[in-house]
Image (spheres, coloured by chain):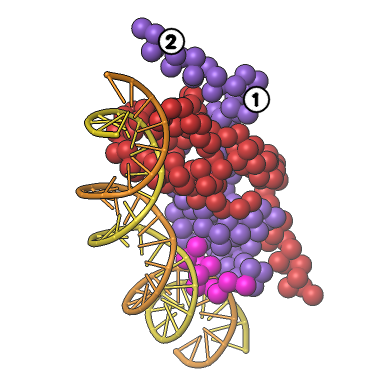
Chain colours: A purple, B red, C orange, D yellow
Amino acid sequence: MDTTTLNALSEPNRLQIVELLREGPLTVGEISERLQIRQPQVSKHLRVLSDAGIVKVHADANRRIYQLRPEPFIQLNAWLESYRRIWEERFDSLDDYLKEMQEKEEK
Amino acid sequence: MDTTTLNALSEPNRLQIVELLREGPLTVGEISERLQIRQPQVSKHLRVLSDAGIVKVHADANRRIYQLRPEPFIQLNAWLESYRRIWEERFDSLDDYLKEMQEKEEK
DNA sequence: TCACAATATTCCTTTACAGGAATATTCTTA
DNA sequence: TAAGAATATTCCTGTAAAGGAATATTGTGA
């Protein structure tokens, strides 16, 4: 797992943009209006999201339509899978660790 | 979704620590050694992870055993769920958007 | 071609935060 | 109780990055 996706999503305004785009593609102006963020900042955030591969652009006249790309989410999901055992695990792994420590000390 | 979890995970060294802890609980010293990061930095990163609720500590003599907490991962997974339709969706949502735009202009 | 609309970029300032080094704290054991 | 582990904290410095304001760019339609 590389941190570019997480990093891009960790900025509050950027996360808001992503959550908004979850409902469907939007123009820069629409995003700016809906979120009450000035247009230049929206463009900058979209740039970061685009560089991270989280959104893609489609030119339509002099508008730019932004939409989410599925890949990073699929990737994130795959990464999370490897942690699934942590919350499905019935036994307390801390006990295991302490037992191990004890065994080492007995040697 | 709040950004504290994402923010904590977006730092490369911190992510490494989390990935290491995925295998089981570890001491500060063990983390420091395994990842070749100086102890004070490890402690600092663990502090951030702890504040974010990603890890919990268990005192054992003068050692501190850190281990992952499941909650943030469960939460992250739930959040990701809401994006699942994006990558499972068969139809191209961009086309829908363009059609909507066209309809609006015809009015 | 010109004026305007939509978007991107640049420059500046401020703030958050990571790492280094040193030191403080806490616990154990001899 | 003193010394030494293991860990946490503090202070400092450098750097990345976010927001504001202004401006550049690109495309459209008259």
- Residue, disc 1: A88
Q: Estimate the x, y position of residue B65 in percent, counting from the top left.
A: 46, 30
Horizontal arrangement in the rendering, residue B91 relative to residue B29 (left or right)? right
Q: Residue at x 65, y 59 (%)?
A: A20
Q: Amino acid at mark 1?
A: Glu
Q: Which residue in the rendered view is the most extreme toward the right?
A: B107
In the rendering, which numbered label is found on residue A103? 2
Res A85 → quadrant: top right
In the rendered image, is residue B9 in sight?
no
Between marks 1 and 2 in the image, the one whose residue lies nearer the viewer: 2
Mark 2 residue element = helix
Q: Are marks 1 and 2 on the same chain?
A: yes
Q: Amino acid at mark 2?
A: Glu
**Which of pointers 1 and 2 lies earlier in the amino acid sequence?**
1
Q: Is residue C16 above or below residue A104?
A: below
| Span colored in magenta | A36-45
Q: Is A80 left, or right, of B93 in this rendering?
A: left
Image quadrant holding the C terminus of chain A, namely top left
Q: In the rendered structure, the residue with mark 1 lies on which chain?
A: A
Percent x, y of residue D20: 48, 80
A57 up-or-down from B87: above or below: below
Callout 2: residue from which chain?
A: A
Q: Tell me the CA gap for discs 1 and 2.
A: 27 Å
Residue sitting at x 44%, y 54%: A51
